[in-house]
Image (cartoon, rainbow, N blue to C red):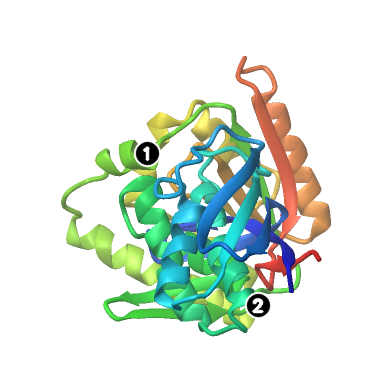
Amino acid sequence: MKTLKIFSPATVANVSCGFDSMGFAVDAIGDEMTFTKTAEKGVKITKITGANLTYDVDKNAASAVVKKILLEANANFGIELTIHKGFSPGSGLGSSAASAAGAAFGINQFLENKYSELELTKFAMFGEEVACGTPIADNVAAAIYGGFVLVRSYEPLDIIKLPVPEKLRVVAIHPQIEVKTKGAREVLPKEIPLKDAITQWANVGGLVSGLYTNNYELISNSLVDLVAEPARKSLIPFFDEVKESAIKAGALGAGISGSGPTIYALCEGDVIAEKVHNAINEAYKNTGIDFEIFTSKVNPVGMKIIK
């Protein structure tokens, strides 16, 4: 194999109650990346489209991951990399994670799948650290494993892939503003009341149980965030209006995707998803803020080889 092209999906992290521990991959948007094997060792980025990202191989999340894996594997070849960003950095949809996870998955194909999904997640977490200063696992794990994931533990890293109910759909709106992950983390509370912590833990358990049992009512009841959402929603214009519109239209629940500004809503079935899509669009169209909106299935497989 000389050249490989892959699709690396966007992801929704936190999923309301699962801060830094839950996420899922989406089907509708993501990055496309090409890897070309070269005789010269090392990594070089030859083209970036769709976003203004650095070509510095040590500062770009994708190339930093490729470089790390090539060194770790003592590879006798190099890689030329192209990246097409299918969605904006700072969107709350795992932009740096798509780059980092896609890089780990792609280079692994040239190494005869030497590394497991868990090992690839660890490499991709390094890319997240390069991009935003924190080695977070929820987005990258969702992209690599596909479907829903639970980061059960960070030390040692333990990723649990969860089932996805067949009718589950996501509607997401991305207001065209940027919320930096670092800034969004700085507004989080330093302490959480015990009562709120217990409720949050219970909701994570409820969401996991709902996914396993196809219990949409339980999923709905569990999509409550008492930790990040109250602190972060002021960073997203008209958040409350969008959430209220989505739920009135029949969404199971709605919340902040990652650190924002994207707002996601989970729905049961295509008919309700279309109603929610229309309701959110109606709620935001006169705000004076440009936005993009999409409806998607949950992506069950994550990464895809295009050719």
Which label sits on residue 232?
1
Quick one: 150 or 167, which is closer to the camera?
150
The x, y position of residue 91, in whole percent, is: 54, 39
User: Quick check: 61 above or below 56?
Assistant: below
Assign the C terminus to one quadrant of the image: bottom right
Instruction: Tell me which residue sits at (57%, 53%) in the image.
Output: 253
In the image, is residue 97 above or below residue 71?
above
Q: In this view, does 273 lie above or below 289?
A: below
The amino acid type, in three-letter code, at marker 2 is Asn
Residue 216 visible (yes or no): yes
Picture residue at 50% right of the left edge, 69% below the top: 141
Seen at 65% across and 58% down, the residue is 9
**Nearest to N terminus: mark 2 or mark 1:** 2
- How crowded is the residue under tag 2: few (<14 C-alpha within 10 Å), some, or many (20+)? some
Instruction: For marks 2 and 1, give the CA distance.
Output: 30 Å
Residue 200: percent from the left, percent from the top?
A: 34, 63
The quadrant of the image that shows the N terminus is: bottom right
Query: Depth-wise, is mark 2 or mark 1 nearer the camera?
Result: 1
Q: Which residue is drawn at 25% across and 40% down?
A: 186
Give the numbered dot on residue 214: 2
Q: Is residue 207 above or below residue 184?
A: below
Kind of residue at disc 1: Arg
- Between residue 118 and residue 275, name the one nearer to us: 118
Q: Which of 160 and 84 is in front in this view?
A: 84
Q: Mark 2–mark 1 contact, CB under 8 Å?
A: no
The 10 Å Cα crowd at callout 1, few under 14, some 14 to 19, many 20 or more, is: many
Is there any visible trace of residue 137 in the rendered image? no
